[in-house]
Amino acid sequence: MELTKNKKGIFFISVAIVIITLLLTSYTVYTKVQERKVIKKRIETMNSFIKSIEQDLERKLFIAGFRSLFTFENKIIETGAYISNVNNSFQEMFFNGTLNGQNQSIMVGATFNDIARDMQTLGNKISINITLTSPQANLDQIDPWNVRIKIVGNFTVRDNGNLSSWNSMLTAVGIVPIEYFDDPV
């Protein structure tokens, strides 16, 4: 009789161990699936954010280019002399907010530092760290009616929770039609 009680006890303990093992395994699998869903959703959010940043960057490059060209036009009208190196002058205005070493208040909010700060402020709202390093800006006329503003740099996006991140080369282009400007001559 005692032997059958021991067999029943061993059987119940074995069943209890199997049930606990199944519960722990299913909980672990469920947790991993939920974690993957969270990571997938975060990546989708970051991807959407990056697309909107790229579109916003094109708009901001348009603004920076427009303000620079407007300043160049006024300088030509005031002095009667042409800008000797338009691309270098644009870079000075875009990166420093100055022209020939003189501060240009029209560039407030349209310099590279302002654009980078705005991007990071937007990123902070959804816990994303954004950096744009080694920027190179260029201004050139692509056809008789349009001026292209192009920026190239290393673009790094990192989730503050370290769920996801990526690095890529960013190329953004803004186009400014010259029909907005009068011939300064």
Image: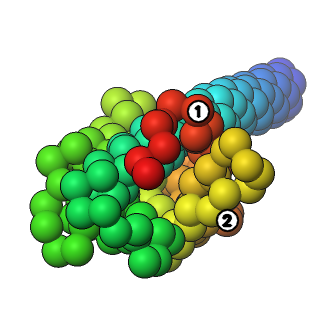
Where residue 166 sits: x, y (%)? 64, 58
Closer to us: 176 or 40: 176
Horizontally, is 164 left or right of 1 in the view?
left
- Residue assigned mark 2: 169
- Residue assigned mark 1: 179
Where residue 73 sits: x, y (%)? 37, 50
The correct choice, above or below, for 137 with respect to 105 in the image is below
- Tell me, for residue 111, which label it has, or none: none
> How many numbered marks does the figure carry?
2
Task: Say what secondary structure mark 1 lies in.
Answer: helix
> Alpha-carbon neighbours of circle 2 within 10 Å: few (<14), some, or many (≥20)?
few
Q: Which residue is drawn at 40% across and 68% down?
A: 82
Task: Say what secondary structure mark 2 lies in.
Answer: strand
Mark positioned earlier in the residue sequence (2 or 1): 2
Where residue 112 sits: x, y (%)? 36, 57
Horizontally, is 83 left or right of 29 in the view?
left
The answer to whether residue 42 shows anywhere in this view is no
Horizontally, is 15 left or right of 146 in the view?
right
Closer to us: 118 or 111: 111
Closer to us: 169 or 69: 69
Mark 2 or 1: in front is 1
* Residue kind at label 1, given as amino acid type: Glu
* Residue kind at label 2, given as amino acid type: Met
